[in-house]
Amino acid sequence: MQTPSIFTVPVTPEEINETQIIDGQMARHLGIEMTEVGPDYMTAKMPVDHRTIQRIGILHGGASLALAETIGSIAASYCVDRERCYIVGQEINANHIRPVREGFVFATATPLHLGKSSQVWDIKIRNEGKKLVCVSRFTVAVLRKPD
């Protein structure tokens, strides 16, 4: 039996990469790309390169947070009626577990709470060897669009 989707409309990684990760905005600049959409999660990847490292050559903690907030925001936006509501970030935190010097990191967002006025997302970032790099919790407000 297939798990029912938490997302309000069917969506693919390709559609998200074309319509949500936009030229000129941070996610595109950092090379963030959606890779997978499951029934209750989304996964994106980001390169560890000149755009995302800090001066000592490891993944910048701020880049990890940008990745976490990007995937959390996109996932959250597909869990509401997009015609009537939109989401905005309220709080994000992170624990940086291990450094990454090269390759890609992969962030997977899963919901902890999907309410009418707020959502809380668990985001785990892993390296190419699937080792935990960063753990983040992201809270969003669900707001109604003006009539």
Image (spheres, grey):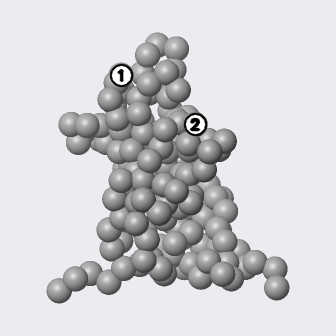
Quarter of the rendering occupied by the C terminus = bottom right
Tell me the residue at 48%/81% (across/down): 8
Tell me the residue at 40%/60% (across/down): 13
Image location (x, y in percent) of residue 7: 45, 77
Q: Is residue 42 left or right of residue 15?
A: left
- Residue holding disc 1: 101
Tell me the residue at 36%/22% (across/down): 101
Residue 29: image tag: 2
Q: What is the residue that sits farthest to the top in this orientation?
A: 56
Mark 1 is surrounded, within 10 Å at the Cα level, by few (under 14), some (14 to 19) or many (20 or more) other residues, namely some
Q: Nearer the viewer, residue 18 or 107?
A: 18
8 over 34 or under it: above or below: below
Question: Could you say which quadrant of the image residue 95 lies in?
Answer: top left
Q: Amino acid at mark 1?
A: Arg
Q: Is residue 96 visible?
A: yes
Image location (x, y in percent) of residue 24: 66, 42
Q: Nearer the viewer, residue 10 or 110?
A: 10
Q: Amino acid at mark 2?
A: His
Q: Is residue 60 visible?
A: no
Q: Nearer the viewer, residue 57 or 35?
A: 35
Quarter of the rendering occupied by the N terminus = bottom left
Label 2 or label 1, whichever lies nearer to me, is: 2
